[in-house]
Image (spheres, rainbow, N blue to C red):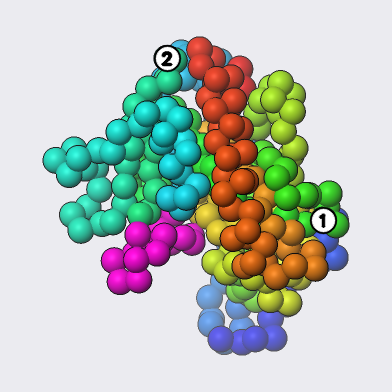
């Protein structure tokens, strides 16, 4: 692979990298040196929202899928709503998968809460994009939810106004560790997309809004930092953009509720700050997700 190809990095906001401009209609296809094939003009991005007419005509939201990564994050919600773990005979997941599902009701909503469970070898929570995308795909395929909520903890950037304990609704998502320095492939790697807009939730529940950047590492190397700045991110996590990718496949609206456990650009080691604040911040997360579910109850997608 030629490493000298120009990197046209997609900028979501005020990052320093130039925004890629698609070729003009009369411009010939670009040919990748060495690889020997041409790239077509990039297809228009998918709609940022479900079809407005369909959404407006839909009935009230009935089934909500909550996707979470860690047991510590999830159990306060399981206990709050008295959710029941699905027995093996009711499993919607492949045989041998460690993924878990809890279900129950709240007001007029049916709730399914899923998480990747414990890794079979190491016995720790199966965090990261691969596990998140797989469990989300299997759950949406089987359960056909009206709405996805990806809830969890995140790192925040004080330079963007984040503080420990803040709860954000993500307005945009992107990846910061998928570096493919080939035209158009670089944009695919970043995977930038708008999330489902929920202006009434933001207004009524007084959450903060910010862009979310996702990667498979808890820490931040210089290359990740450069991409995060380019993504104009206020918060970073290890699952959100992967869940968004699956939600787009199914055209299912998804909301991302993230509570800040650590300040990435602060003066404390990230692992230490994360562990010290995990319990208290997950308690705030539980309160916030409960408020979201209360608000959703009885409403249509277009009311959010």
| Circle 2 residue | 108
Is the C-beta separation of discs 2 and 1 under 8 Å?
Answer: no
Question: Cα distance, mark 2 to mark 1?
Answer: 39 Å
**Can residue 302 be seen in this snapshot?**
no
180 and 205: which one is in front?
205
Q: Does label 2 or label 1 sit earlier along the sequence? A: 2
Left or right, 109 with respect to 205, comes to left
Q: Residue 272 carries which label?
A: none
Please give the name of the residue rendered at 46% of the width and 43% of the height, measured from the top-left corner: 74
> Measured from the top left, where is residue 212 in percent x and y?
67, 51
Q: Answer few, some or many: residues within 10 Å of disc 1's Cα (few below 14, many 20 plus, some between 14 and 19).
A: some
Please report the bounds of the magenta region as a residue range.
118-133
Residue sticking out furthest to the left: 89
Residue for point 74% across, 59% down: 263
The one nearer the camera, 146 or 41, is 146
Looking at the figure, which quarter contains the N terminus? bottom right
**Label 2 CA crowd tier, 10 Å (few <14, some 14–19, many 20+):** some
User: Is residue 129 highlighted in magenta?
Assistant: yes
- Judged left or right of residue 205, residue 76 is left
As drawn, 167 above or below 131? above
- Residue position for label 1: 158
């Amino acid at each position: 692979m030629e490493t000298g190809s120009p990197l046209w990095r997609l900028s979501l906001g005020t990052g320093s990298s130039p925004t890629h401009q698609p070729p003009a209609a009369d411009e010939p296809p670009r040919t990748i040196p060495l690889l020997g094939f041409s790239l077509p003009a990039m297809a228009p991005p998918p709609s940022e929202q479900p079809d407005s007419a369909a959404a407006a005509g839909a009935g009230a939201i009935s089934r909500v899928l909550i996707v979470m990564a860690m047991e510590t994050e999830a159990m306060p919600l399981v206990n709050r709503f008295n959710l029941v773990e699905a027995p093996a005979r009711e499993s919607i997941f492949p045989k041998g998968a460690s993924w878990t599902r809890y279900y129950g009701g709240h007001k007029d909503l049916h709730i399914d809460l899923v998480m990747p469970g414990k890794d079979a070898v190491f016995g720790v929570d199966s965090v990261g994009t691969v596990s998140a995308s797989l469990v989300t795909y299997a759950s949406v395929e089987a359960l056909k939810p009206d709405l996805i909520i990806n809830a969890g903890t995140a790192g925040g950037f004080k330079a963007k106004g984040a503080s420990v304990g803040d709860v954000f609704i993500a307005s945009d998502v992107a990846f910061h560790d998928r570096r493919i320095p080939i035209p158009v492939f670089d944009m695919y790697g970043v995977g930038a997309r708008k999330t489902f807009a929920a202006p009434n939730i933001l207004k009524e529940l007084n959450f903060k809004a910010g862009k979310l950047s996702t990667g498979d590492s808890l820490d931040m190397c210089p290359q990740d930092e450069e991409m995060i700045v380019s993504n104009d991110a206020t918060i970073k996590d290890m699952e959100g953009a992967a869940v968004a990718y699956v939600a787009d496949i199914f055209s299912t609206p998804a909301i991302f509720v993230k509570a800040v456990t650590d300040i990435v650009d602060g003066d404390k080691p990230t692992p230490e700050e994360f562990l010290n604040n995990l319990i208290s911040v997950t308690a705030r997360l539980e309160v916030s997700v409960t408020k979201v579910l209360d608000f959703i109850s009885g409403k249509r997608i277009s009311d959010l």
